[in-house]
Structure formats: C-alpha cells, structure tokens
Image (cartoon, rainbow, N blue to C red):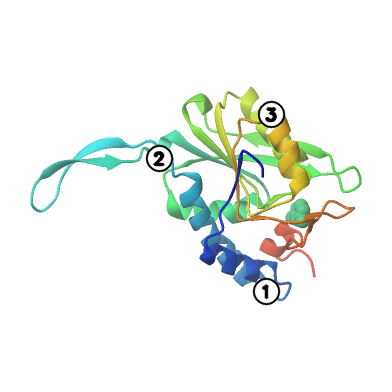
C-alpha cells in the first residue's frame, strides 16, 4: 500500500489499541496500556539494530556474545504526547539517548510551530527514532524530521500508534527515506485534523487534561 509503511498488527497490540480507542478508558489505564504497546512497537522498530560482541563467561565457559550499544540509539519524543510512548521504549532500552522536540499545531491552520529542540550530539552516528502516537496531517512529523536532518541525523525512523493515510502520504513524500512504523492505519482525518476513528487527543488522554 505504502512502500515505507509497516503496520504492526500483532494480536496483543490490536487488543491494547482497542482499550486505548475506547473513550471510557481511564487516564491511568490509558497511560499504562500505551506504555505496554510501546514495548511491543519498540521491538519492531529496533529489529534491524546492529549488534556488537562482548566477551563474557557463563557459569560453564567463555563466549563472545551479541551486545547492543545503547548509545547508538536515540529516541526523539515529539512533545507532549510522544512522552507517552517514550516511557515504554525506555523500559525496553534504558540506555538509549533521548531528544525532545516541542511542536504545537495551530488548531486553525493545522500548521506546526516548533518551540523547543534538544537532542544528543553525534546524531549522524545514531539510529534516530522519532516518536509521536498520532501521525495526522504529517506537518508535525515533517517539521521534526527536517530539523533532525539539519542537526545531522541520517538514519531516521518514525514510530506512531495510529496513522492517517493523509499523514503517511505527506510524510512519505517529504521524506521517502524515513520508514514509518504504526500499530494502525486508520480511515481518514476529520475537518479539524483528528484521526477517524482514532482515539481522540493523545496528549489529553495520556495526561487527563480534558473532561
Ligand atoms: N493528534 C491527536 O492527538 N489526535 C488526533 O486524532 C490527531 C492529532
């Protein structure tokens, strides 16, 4: 369908996504389940990480065993909803470096306005995984990837929970080199830029800032 899109349709993810979509799910459960989903998505998005070798001794003998160098990996969370996914990703890879990009979308024009950008150094040596639960218009994702490339990032992936076809198309066109990994490809955007059926405003659902 889209050459650079992977939909991770593992039954556990699909089950947990149903809980996240349900408007009656509490803030506490939403946060917890999102964290669990992030761990599973994290396995998919890191499946091609390169391994080094380390010499260790098992109780029986010495071996040279595979070993991940966490410092080669950088998660970049798009504030604020990205932090809901970040927590689970750091459960999985505690040694990963973390960057933050603050981008707010204008509710009328749906354009992205960046107010914060802080990343680790040597981005060119790292796999940079941008995380935001919702890929909606694609404007935020494109702005974040533009800025990361300017800061030196070469190998970038985009990880989200729910994607809209409009966002996938726009991001793929702007950055065809960036693989997109999602748990679901939803139907479409509504006229104010929310994903249908979606799960509402991810930030509000994570932090309980509405209702
Ligand atoms: N951001 C959200 O949090 N939800 C959407 O549906 C679209 C963008």
Q: Quadrant of residue 3?
A: top right
Closer to the N terminus: mark 1 or mark 3? 1
Q: Is residue 40 left or right of residue 189?
A: left
| Horizontal side, residue 57 vs residue 158: left or right | left
The x, y position of residue 202, in whole percent, is 71, 58
Question: Distance between the Cα atoms at labels 1 and 3?
Answer: 35 Å
Q: Quadrant of ligand 1?
A: bottom right
Categorize mark 1 by other alpha carbons within 10 Å: few (<14), some (14-19), many (20+).
Answer: some
Counting from the top left corner in percent of width and height, residue 205 is at 71, 64
Q: Is residue 77 above or below residue 34?
A: above
Residue 64 image-quadrant placement: top left
Residue farthest to the front? 1
Q: Do we see residue 65 in this rendering?
A: yes
Residue 95, x across and y down, in percent? 41, 44
**Label 2 secondary element:** helix
The C terminus sits in image quarter? bottom right
Which one is in front in this view, the residue at disc 2 or the one at disc 3?
3
Q: Residue at x 46, y 44 (%)?
A: 46
Q: Is residue 198 left or right of residue 149?
A: right
Instruction: Locate residue 52 relative to residue 205 in the image: left or right.
Output: left
Which residue in the protein does label 2 denote? 70
Distance of label 2 from label 3 (alpha carbons): 24 Å
Residue tagged 1: 25
Mark 2, residues whose alpha carbon is within 10 Å: few (<14), some, or many (≥20)?
some
Closer to the N terminus: mark 1 or mark 2? 1
Q: From the image, tell me which residue sits under label 3.
A: 146
* Residue 61 at x, y percent in the picture: 8, 47
Q: Nearer the viewer, residue 43 or 34?
A: 43
Do callouts 2 and 3 mark residues in contact (Cβ within 8 Å)? no
What is the CA distance from the residue labelled 1 to the residue labelled 2?
34 Å
Determine crowd level at label 3: few under 14, some 14-19, many 20+ residues with C-alpha closer than 10 A: some
Ligand 1 within 8 A of label 1's CB?
no
């Amino acid at each position: 369908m889209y050459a650079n899109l992977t939909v991770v349709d593992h039954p556990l993810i699909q089950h947990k996504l149903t809980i996240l979509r349900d408007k009656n799910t509490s803030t506490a459960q939403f946060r917890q389940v999102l964290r669990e989903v992030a761990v599973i998505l994290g396995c998919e998005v890191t499946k091609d990480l390169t391994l080094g070798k380390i010499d260790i001794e098992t109780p029986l003998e010495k071996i040279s065993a595979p070993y991940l160098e966490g410092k080669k990996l950088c998660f970049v969370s798009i504030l604020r909803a990205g932090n809901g996914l970040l927590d689970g990703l750091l459960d999985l890879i505690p040694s990963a470096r973390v960057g933050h990009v603050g981008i707010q979308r204008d509710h009328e024009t749906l354009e992205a306005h960046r107010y914060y950008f802080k990343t680790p150094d040597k981005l060119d040596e790292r796999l940079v995984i941008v995380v935001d639960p919702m890929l909606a218009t694609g404007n935020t994702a494109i702005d974040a990837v533009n800025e990361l490339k300017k800061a030196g990032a070469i190998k970038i992936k985009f990880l989200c929970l729910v994607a809209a076809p409009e966002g996938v198309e726009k991001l793929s066109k702007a950055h065809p080199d960036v693989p997109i990994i999602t748990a679901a490809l939803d139907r479409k955007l509504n006229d104010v830029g929310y994903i249908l059926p979606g799960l509402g405003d991810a930030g509000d659902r994570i932090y309980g800032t509405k209702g």
